[in-house]
Each structure stands twice: as C-alpha cells, then as structure tokens.
Image (tube, coloured by chain):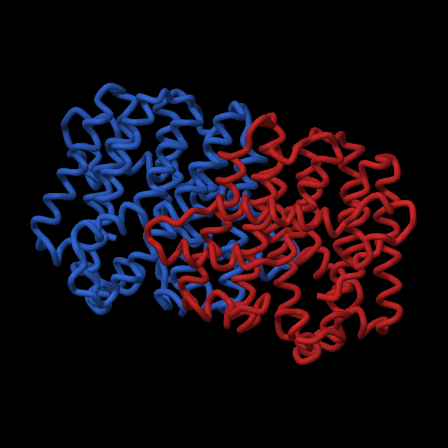
Chain colours: A red, B blue
Amino acid sequence: MVATDNAHKPGKMASFDLMVYLKARQKLCEDALDKSLPMSYPDKIYESMRYSLLAGGKRLRPILCLATCEMMGGTIEMSMPTACAVEMIHTMSLIHDDLPAMDNDDYRRGKLTNHKIYGDDIAILAGDGLLAYAFEYVATRTQNVPLDRLLQVVARLGRAVGAAGLVGGQVVDLESEGKSDTTLETLTFIHNHKTGALLEACVVCGGIIAGASPDDIQKLTRYSQNIGLAFQIIDDILDITATNEQLGKTAGKDQKAQKVTYPKLWGLEESQKQAEKLIEEACTELNSYGEKAQPLIALAHFITSRNH
Amino acid sequence: MVATDNAHKPGKMASFDLMVYLKARQKLCEDALDKSLPMSYPDKIYESMRYSLLAGGKRLRPILCLATCEMMGGTIEMSMPTACAVEMIHTMSLIHDDLPAMDNDDYRRGKLTNHKIYGDDIAILAGDGLLAYAFEYVATRTQNVPLDRLLQVVARLGRAVGAAGLVGGQVVDLESEGKSDTTLETLTFIHNHKTGALLEACVVCGGIIAGASPDDIQKLTRYSQNIGLAFQIIDDILDITATNEQLGKTAGKDQKAQKVTYPKLWGLEESQKQAEKLIEEACTELNSYGEKAQPLIALAHFITSRNH
C-alpha cells in the first residue's frame, strides 16, 4: 500500500510520490476551474457559483478524470474541460444537498454553505447554473477529441447525475432516513448512485476521451465502482471517528439522523477491512496497464487512508 | 394576421389551419414526452418528474423546435429528442421557480405544484434530474443528425438555461422584486434571459439540427428574440386581465409582488401594440422561406392572440 504521509516508504510504488502528484494536479484543477467561470453580469449568481466551485476540496473527481485519460494514452488538455465539468456537477450536488429543504447544513469544507451566504433562492439557481454550464463547457471547450467521444461524455455525465444516478441515490437516501431497518442492499444502492455514479463517470469519461476500448471501459468501470463504494464506507467511518474540524463539516450527522451506515451494519473494524478489500480489487483491474496505472492505484489507496 | 379561432378566415394563410396543426403537434409531443421518461426505481422521483413533465401545457417550445427543423428541411424524427429536451428544461425551471424559496406558488396549469405533492426536497431533485436527463436524451436518442450539430445543440441548451440565460434572468428578476424603479432596460434583460433564451434555443436548435447556414441562424435568432419578448409582454398583460382559471395559475401576482411590468411602464394598450409590432418584425425575418414558414408565422401570431 502507498503511504500518503510518507513519501519515502519503500515498496513497488516507491518511485511515485502521490502527495507531490496530488498537489500539482490540484493546482492545475484550481487554475482551470478559476478560469472556467469568470465573473459576469448578474454578479450575484456568478459570485455564488464561484464561491462553491472554488471552495477548495481535494478535487479527487477531476484528478481521477485526468489520470484515467492519461493512463489510456490521452492528455490533460483533452480531458480538462470534462474534469472541470465533473467538479461543477459535484459542486451543484453539494449546494442543493445542503439546502434547508434537504440536509440543512450550515457548513461545508469549513466554510458557510452557499445558501447561508446567498439565500436559498440563489443557491438553487447557482446549482442549476453549474449543472447546465457543465454540459455547455464540455461541448464548447474540448479540443482535439473526436465528436462521438464527446457525445458519449455528455450522455455519461447526464446519466450519472440524473434519476438513474446521483439524484436517484439521494431520493432513496431521503426515504431511508429515520428507518432502522434499511437493508445492506438498499444502503449499497444509495451509495452506488449517490457517490458511485459520478466517480464512475469521472473515470470512464477520462477513458472515453482517450479512446478506451470496450474492454478497457469494463475494467475502468469495475475499478471506479469499487473505489466508489470504498469511498463511501470510509465516509461513514469518518462520520463516527473524525471531528468537525477534520471534516470541515458537521460530524456525527449520520448517527443523529439515525441513518443506517456500514459501520452500523458491520462494525468499524470490518468496515475498514471491506473498504481495503474493495481497493485491492479495484487495483487488480488495472494490472494490465503496468506503470501507467501508478496514479490511479495510488489514488485508490489514498481514499482508504484519508482522514477527512 | 392569422385568426386562431377561425380556420376559414380568408387571406394568404387561409390554407394553413393552426388549430389543427397545433393539436396534431401537441399529440405528437405528448406521446414522445410520455415515452421519453418511463417509470423506474426509485418510483417517487420518476413519478415526480413525470407529474410535471406530463402536466399538459401548450408545448409551444417543442413545437417551435420541430417547426423550425422542418422549415429548414429537416424532419420531426431528427428534432424530436431535442424538442423533448427543451420541454424537460422548461419543466425543470417551472418546478424550481414554484418552490417556497423562490416564487412560492401552489398551483401551475391548474394543478398543485410539484413540491406541494412531493415535498420541497423531491421537487429540487426532480428539477435536477430533468435538467441532467435533457442533455443525456439529446446525446443518446438523436438519430441521423451529424455529431457536430448535436454538440452545438448541447452547447446552446446549456447556455440557454445557465447563468448566461434563464438562471441569470431569474436572478435579476429576484433582485428587482419590490423595487419600483426598475428600468425598461433591466426589465428587457430579465425577459430576454428568463423567457427569451430558451425560446431562442428551441428555434435555433431546430435550425441547427436541419443544417441551417449562419445566415439562416441569424434570421431564426431575430425571429425568436422578437417572439420571446412579445410572449413576455402578453404574459404581463394576461397577469392583469385574465382570471386564475384562464391562466391555471395565480393571476395578479406581478401586481402583488410590486413587480415592474410592461403594462406598468407603457399602459395596456401600448403594450399590446408593441407585442404586435414585435410579431410583425419576427415574421418579416421569415420572408425568404415562403410557404414553408407558415407554421412559424402562425405560431408567432398565436402568441399575441392567446388568452392564457
């Protein structure tokens, strides 16, 4: 496993320094996101959209998109508009999720949530604006990518965020709130859709842009589904074990909302084990890509070792 | 002018019966919309999306899209997925606009609004789902249209609904509420964006799908901008003169919200005159298309003669 806090740890990935890689990629993404949405009239909506889009975060989703595109022989330039689009979509889902009518959260990444600053009406519109702009951005800003691939990206992104993806997962999540008899099957549906669908789209779209074959797409799909579920298991664990400060948002929310979580079904230790197993399986899918898979493998391990 | 309630009125458009045309096109659109979004798990979100998407209405937007595509030499089949997409986007904007955090409306088209039936959380998600699905639908269901045109459609639709379009118009509208000193310039910005941008996208996308030239696109743009503004002037007039029953929504809302409207700036009679002038100018743009322009010309006149 790759250590995330010790760049000198020996092992087969010793030559790859994830922290240096992440820092460089985060910088690239921050710059691209900043440029993607310049201020314009009416100021208030652009300010609101930029407030949440540029509120930091690990930028895991765009980085996964860029890394997959590169692994499959594409370039950062080819995939950056799509990488920005997935972060716009992710940001939209956070803004709407935090609304009083939804999770009613005051803090996100250690900052006041969008509606606490701009009001519920502007927050709803900022989400709508970001979602629409994501598709416009992919369609107008991508260069040197065959058009059939771009249309596949549009279709995949749409599916990942709609009722067959993120939105569907959120609905089942809302329905299961306060219910103590939620099954493992339902819990997995929620996460495969609420978190998994967009993570999968990040990875698969990166591959599509680079011209991945159907066989490659299958491997990428399994890799991303495994890390998506592991990501959510770790999220559940952190909700119990981490502090508000570490999370930058309210900890202990799941318990308060009486949500069924993996630690509740499996216990903390078994949950951690399951997450690690999923990550190992995810990495196995990338065996055939050799050294080129280093970033995606390191990113997968990073997900289980993060503490916020 | 074309009579909308008298198919036998003599004149150069006598051979074209708009009411028969509209009825047939509405049926086509209803069927296509019904098929576009079949029920699936989780039921609640699909029910909610279908509730608003299939709540009737004049279907002016999809009909404009189909009519423009045909005028420019394309077919209904080529443009139907985009026609459905514009209605999905329009429906999303209505669902979000009706929310308590926005206009707080209980009725729409004579039926309870989405959030009154499904709750604010599901209504927010239903809008998000419809918006995302619109793009997926265009990208996956359009056949026999060159891919570069489809990507232009995706870009135009995204722009029409985002901060540079509908969302931007809504923000300025919200900001001007309760202000009695809103200028004509601001009022026109609001409507050009809140209503005009999507109407323009319907018409222009229909043209793009059929392979319209840049010169054609310019004419279509001017036609649609004129009818968009006329549409809004008539909306303002109807808010004053029509009853709740005729509108299927709350009448007199603008006055109650102390919104500046065209009748307030110009008076009722001058507003009606201005709307008719805009429609005449819109139709002049279509002179070169001869008989083929009959549906778009009749649709333009229909907008000023409607009473709901």
Q: Which quarter of the figure has residue A255?
A: bottom right
The residue depicted at 58 percent of the width and 58 percent of the height is: A56
Instruction: Reply above or below: B233 against B215.
Output: below
**Residue A154 x %, y %:** 58, 39
Q: Which quarter of the figure has residue B55?
A: bottom left
Return the residue found at the far front. A8
The residue depicted at 54 percent of the width and 50 percent of the height is: A88
Please indicate whether residue B249 sits to the left or right of residue B85 in the image.
left
Please indicate whether residue A54 sits to the left or right of residue A65 in the image.
left
**Residue B17 x %, y %:** 26, 32
Q: How many marks?
A: 0
Instruction: Reply above or below: A48 against A132.
Output: below
Instruction: Reply above or below: A194 against B115.
Output: above
- Please indicate, yes or no, whether residue B185 appears anywhere in the rendered image: yes
**Residue B232 x %, y %:** 24, 49
Front residue of B86/B246: it is: B86
The residue depicted at 59 percent of the width and 66 percent of the height is: A109
- Please indicate, yes or no, whether residue B54 appears anywhere in the rendered image: no
In the rendered image, the quadrant that contains the C terminus of chain A is bottom right
Please indicate whether residue A194 sits to the left or right of residue A222 in the image.
left
